[in-house]
Amino acid sequence: MLRIGVLALQGDFAAHEDVITNLGHAAEAVRRARDLSTLDALIMPGGESSAMLRLMQAEDLGGAIAERIRGGLPVLATCAGVILLAHGVSPWQPSLGLLDIDVIRNAYGRQVHSAVEKIRLVEEFAEPREIDGVLIRAPRISRVGTRVDILAWFGNDPVLVRQGSIIGATFHPELGRDTRVHRQLLAMTGNDG
Ligand code: GLN
């Protein structure tokens, strides 16, 4: 059984915890730096990135998370979590800069304020490759660095990316029925037996 930390300061961390538990692994709430010590992987959920940034300042939790990710801890970031990891954020706000993409916050505006859209997974995934993706005031990925693989598209926009041990989804796989994105995180621990 893997120990999957879920950053639980704010946002929809409980939905991620349910997915991990349903997949037979232990979901552990991360609220302080010491909660990071024994994890096999980390999930940074959706919510409000500016609020999370503020809460992550306590005990420099943000710095501790960055250190573990640089050390190779596998991470799945969704929506606000992607904004926290991105290199560049527009309108500007601080970020950990560990994922070489730029994002525009709330870029889909009201049309996609909260919508289920068809998302196309790339060929490394088995069928079905067209899945439902829940977009909730999602950021738009406006630049993708050369070391970043695009794993899914919504129209012409990347919505699922991977760089080394980091997976970022601007949609919410934890709110859909398809668990493949979470299972990819588990596989990245090299220990999901
Ligand atoms: N708009 C939010 C932000 O900027 C992200 C929305 C989400 O995580 N569902 O933090």
Image (cartoon, grey):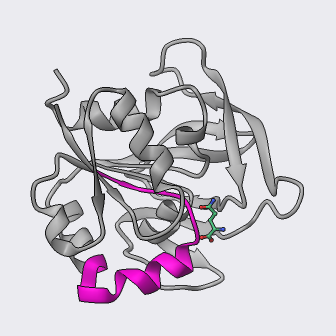
Provide residue 159's location: percent of width, then percent of height: 60, 46
In the image, residue 178 sits, relative to residue 4, either above or below, namely above
Quadrant in which ligand 1 is drawn = bottom right
Residue pictured at 58% horizontal, 26% vertical = 177
Picture residue at 20% right of the left edge, 53% below the top = 73
Q: In the displayed structure, does residue 8 sit left or right of residue 138?
A: left
Quick one: 14 or 41, which is closer to the camera? 14
* The N terminus, quarter of image: top left
Dominant secondary structure of the magenta stretch?
Answer: helix
Residue 146's spot in the image, x, y percent? Answer: 42, 53
Q: Nearer the viewer, residue 62 or 162?
A: 62
Q: Is residue 50 magenta?
A: yes
The answer to whether residue 23 is magenta is no
Residue drawn at x 43%, y 35% is: 19
* Image quadrant assignment for residue 103: bottom right
Residue at x-position 28% and y-position 27%: 24
From the top left corner, tell me how far across and down residue 143 is, in percent: 58, 61
Residue lying farthest to the right in this orientation: 111
Quadrant location of the C terminus in the rendered image:
top left
On screen, 56 above or below 40?
A: below
Task: Answer with left or right where residue 119 lies relative to residue 86.
Answer: right
Region in magenta: 42-62
Left/right placement of residue 113 relative to residue 14 reads right
Residue nearer the viewer, 114 or 151 = 114
Outermost residue, left side? 38
Residue 164 in the image, given as x and y percentages of width and height: 29, 48
